[in-house]
Image (cartoon, rainbow, N blue to C red):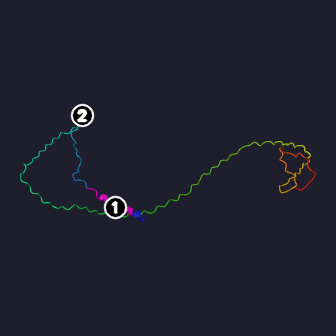
Amino acid sequence: MCQKMVMQTIIFAAVLACAVARPEPPSSYGPPATSYGVPAPQYGPPQQPIVHKHVYVHVPPPDNEVPKPQKQIYVPPPQKHYKIVFIKAPTPPTPTAPVIPVQPQNEEKTLVYVLVKKPEDQPDIVIPTPAPTQPSKPEVYFIRYKTQKQDGYPAAAPPASQYGPPAAAPSSEYGAP
């Protein structure tokens, strides 16, 4: 806030100094000339009279006497005195924002009724069931195998090229694999 006041004061002083230091107008100013010459004759009346001025200058004959040089007179330079006045205007009160009440909002509602015809009762769906079949007896296969750690078993046969039961009939012996 202080810097703002200093800046305003400096600007005000600069404007005031410029206003006081402006040059004075020359005293040769006067009312504007009323005559600018004779208007062209094609414009018609009123016509102004023609003015003739004769100026004569008489100069005396040259003087053979040499004038003495004049003594230089010291003239101090002109001085200008400025008086600068600062006036601090009173601070305006801080503005307060007006309190605006909340505007009531219009309520709009749209009701849509869809009329749908109630469908007639459909007949029950009958799904035909297949006739029950007698469960078949499961086929069980026992496969003997051995690992490389076990001795006494024949070498393993190469895998069959077809899926399904083995070509040989199952053995009736059971034993450890």
Q: Quadrant of the N terminus?
A: bottom left
Boundaries of the magenta span: 6-23
Point out residue 39 in the picture as x, y percentages from the top left corner.
Answer: 23, 38
Near mark 1 (Cα within 10 A), the count class, few <14, some 14-19 or many ≥20, is some
Q: Main secondary structure of the magenta part?
A: helix
Disc 2 secondary structure class: helix
Q: Which residue is mark 2?
A: 42
Point out residue 62 in the picture as x, y percentages from the top left corner.
Answer: 7, 49
Quarter occupied by residue 44: top left
Point out residue 63 in the picture as x, y percentages from the top left corner.
Answer: 6, 51
Residue extending farthest to the top is 42
Residue 58 in the figure: left or right of residue 17: left
Q: Which mark is residue 13?
A: 1
Please check the rendered image and state whether residue 10 is part of the magenta-colored stretch, yes or no.
yes
Q: Residue at x 38, y 64 (%)?
A: 6
Amino acid residing under circle 2 = Gln
Disc 1 secondary structure class: helix
| Mark with earlier residue (1, 2) | 1
Nearest the eye: 7 or 158: 158
Please check the rendered image and state whether residue 164 is part of the magenta-colored stretch, yes or no.
no
